[in-house]
Image (cartoon, rainbow, N blue to C red):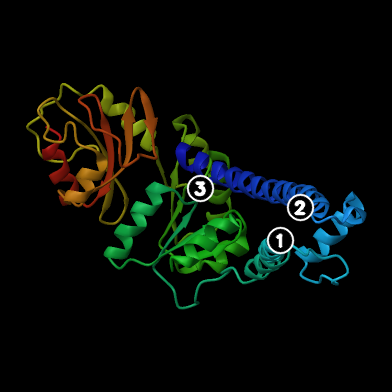
Amino acid sequence: MLPSGKRRTSSSKKFRKMVHKKVHRTYRGLALLLLIIYILSFEYLMLLENQPEHANPITAIYWATTTIATVGYGDVVFNSLTGQLFSILVQVVGIILISGFLVTYIIMPRLDRVLMVRLPRKVPSSMKDHIIISGYNQLVETLIDELAEQEILFVIVDDDAELIKELEYKDTPCVYGAPSDRQTLINANIEKARVLITNMSDERNANIALTAKEFENVKIIAIVEDMANSKYLKYAGADTVVSPKSMFGQHIGKKAVDRLVSRVTGATEVFEGIHITEFPIYLKSPLLGKTLKEISGQSLTGARIVGIWKSGTLSFNPKEEDVIKDNSVLLAVGTPEQLSRLKKLTH
């Protein structure tokens, strides 16, 4: 993917694993802590009720486990109101803990295995003249919004099961499988497609292009993170190599160009009717001081901002609260008309 796209995908996987581990550790730690509290509380209450024969760790563990499991045998009971209320609390919390255990360690793992089997692995055989996109990030998210608006068929191909689940939940056409695998591309009806966009790492893009080049009917567009690798991608079979990062850099040195030119220049057509280009922000621009949320909320141009240069750092994952400054450079996607309207506002 694009640099941020790759980081986003790999980081999201690491984040999910980290969250799952943290949840499991938290669950186990909470269960152990509650058990200790129950044991100590049981012994203390038994002493208060003058039942010292029960005030020992073994009996306490026995009572706690049978009460948590709600299968108490009635051989060890409290006589006071406080003790009875404590027993009710332990039973209620026990039901919650057992339910959480069943969901976390039994139901969800089995459900995940079922969903893995049911992940979409093939598009309808009738799909044709569509666009195949391997890899998914904010740039692709914006592009597929444009495709949907123009009623252009597309399908996302990725081997990230969690991502495919999310896309399927959103009713986004997708296929689970390695994009560099020939059968996966066939399952995406590459033989009837018009464009394949590879949006993963440069190495994976090259592997995908090598696999796809045997299908001569499809045009291959590779989104490259390092322009130095563009020639290798072309050797591998890419018809067009696009580098949004390079496009940003080109305009950093163009601050002094004629600000009155309204026609969009330097735009790259990623597919029919949809272009991607970059815009430097000038001193008199009405966009200065506004956040990306304010701009998108006003629907000023219809173009979508998918990248921004801020504080000397290039980001392909702009946030709504990012403020546009006089040294900002925006990367936008849209039709020529939408991009022209945006360009007028940058001057």
Q: Nearer the viewer, residue 32 or 1?
A: 32
Q: Residue at x 18, y 31 (%)?
A: 289
Q: Please, what is the three-letter code of the amino acid marked with disc 3?
A: Gly
Dot 3 and dot 1 residues touching (CB under 8 Å): no
Q: What kind of element bears circle 3?
A: loop
**Is residue 297 visible to the viewer in this orientation of the structure?**
yes
The quarter of the picture where the C terminus appears is: top left
CA gap, disc 2 and disc 1: 8 Å
Q: Residue at x 48, y 29 (%)?
A: 228
**Is residue 224 visible to the viewer in this orientation of the structure?**
no
CA gap, disc 3 and disc 1: 66 Å
Q: Nearer the viewer, residue 215 or 339?
A: 339
Position of residue 14 measured from the top left corner of the image (x, y, whole percent) = 61, 43
Q: In the picture provided, is 308 more to the left or to the right than 25? A: left
Q: Residue at x 67, y 47 (%)?
A: 26
Question: Closer to the camera: disc 3 or disc 1?
Answer: 1
The residue identified by callout 3 is 237
Dot 2 and dot 1 residues touching (CB under 8 Å): yes
Position of residue 34 measured from the top left corner of the image (x, y, whole percent) = 72, 50
Q: Within 10 Å of the Cα at label 1, are there few (<14), some (14-19), or many (20+) other Cα atoms? A: many
Q: Quadrant of residue 182?
A: bottom right
Picture mark count: 3
Q: What kind of element bears circle 1?
A: helix
Q: Within 10 Å of the Cα at label 2, are there few (<14), some (14-19), or many (20+) other Cα atoms? A: many
Q: In the picture provided, is 211 more to the left or to the right than 254? A: right
Position of residue 225 measured from the top left corner of the image (x, y, whole percent) = 46, 35
Q: What kind of element bears circle 2?
A: helix
Quick check: 220 above or below 76? above
Marking on residue 215: none
The residue identified by callout 2 is 38
